Image (cartoon, rainbow, N blue to C red):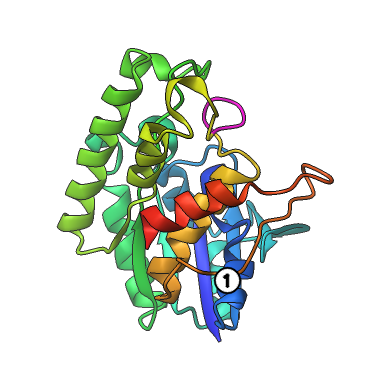
Amino acid sequence: MKKILAIGNSFSEDATYYLHSIGEAAGVENMVVNLYIGGCPLETHWRNIEGNHRAYQYQINGKKTDRYVSIQDMLDMEEWDAIVTHQASHDSGWIDSYEPFLGLICAYLKEKAPKAELFLNETWAYETDSTHDRFIRYNRNQEEMYCRLKHAYETMAAKYELPLIPSGDLIQKLRASESFANGKRSICRDGFHMSFMDGRYAVAAMWAKHLFHVRVKGNPYVPVTENLPGAEADPEILNLIQDLIG
């Protein structure tokens, strides 16, 4: 069984919502846990490690629970195959916000979970009309935000020798496609979080490729979400996402 742990926030919540199901459809028995604190940056993750704070909502296989845990609790509970983290979206384009916290987190995880492979997830830029209060830091310019965060993630991934999951790159490619360009369709539900169907599926599929080492093209799983009762996924959009990931 593949055991995946995400130490993140609402962006990793988006990424892990369909991950378990996509993996199962590919024949990969798996367990996916997301440790959730809304908007949580790397600095807070490190402070929580230092204090062993049970501050994280325990989410398993895309489902929320009423359980709250610490990172150490999770490392004691399971032997993880992969552990994924990322910077808070609003700080992702600022390299100085990663330090020294990413390095400290990596050193801690390597000591406490030596068999786990550590990954860095590249978050995505906000929509052009996003009302997120931190978007002003990027002059409310999606391309500027994307370029800044891409540079920061690639720099940090290289520095700490972490495989990078290029979620942000995928979202920009989708935005440039005929299906999403010129406001035809939004990949976000509120200007920065992924849409419940297309967006969450796209990022989860990208994670599946990198964490489960499976081919996404042809994966039979069709997303169903409790957030949109009765909604059906658009096969053309799913095919587009699969084509972009491979």
Q: What's the residue type where badge 1 is placed?
A: Met
Q: In the picture provided, is 83 more to the left or to the right than 5?
A: left
State yes or no: residue 225 in magenta: no
What is the x, y in percent for residue 176? 36, 33
Farthest right residue in view: 229
Q: Nearer the viewer, residue 72 or 51?
A: 72
Is residue 107 visible in the rendered image? The answer is: yes
Query: Residue 73's quadrant in the figure?
Result: bottom right
Q: Residue at x 59, y 83 (%)?
A: 29
Magenta span dominant secondary structure: loop
Q: In the picture provided, is 87 more to the left or to the right than 161?
A: right
Is residue 73 visible in the rendered image? The answer is: no
Q: Residue at x 25, y 40 (%)?
A: 150
How many residues crowd around disc 1 within 10 Å: few (fewer than 14), some, or many (20 or more)?
some
Quadrant for the C terminus, please: bottom left
What is the x, y in percent for residue 212? 45, 75
Q: Which residue is mark 1?
A: 74
Q: In the picture provided, is 48 more to the left or to the right than 161?
A: right
52 lies above or below 167: below
214 lies above or below 45: below
Q: Residue at x 34, y 76 (%)?
A: 111
Q: In the image, which residues are magenta?
A: 188-192
What is the x, y in percent for residue 199? 55, 43
Q: Residue at x 42, y 52 (%)?
A: 46
Query: Residue 149's quadrant in the figure?
Result: top left
What is the x, y in percent for residue 32? 59, 69
Q: Helix, strand or loop at disc 1?
A: helix
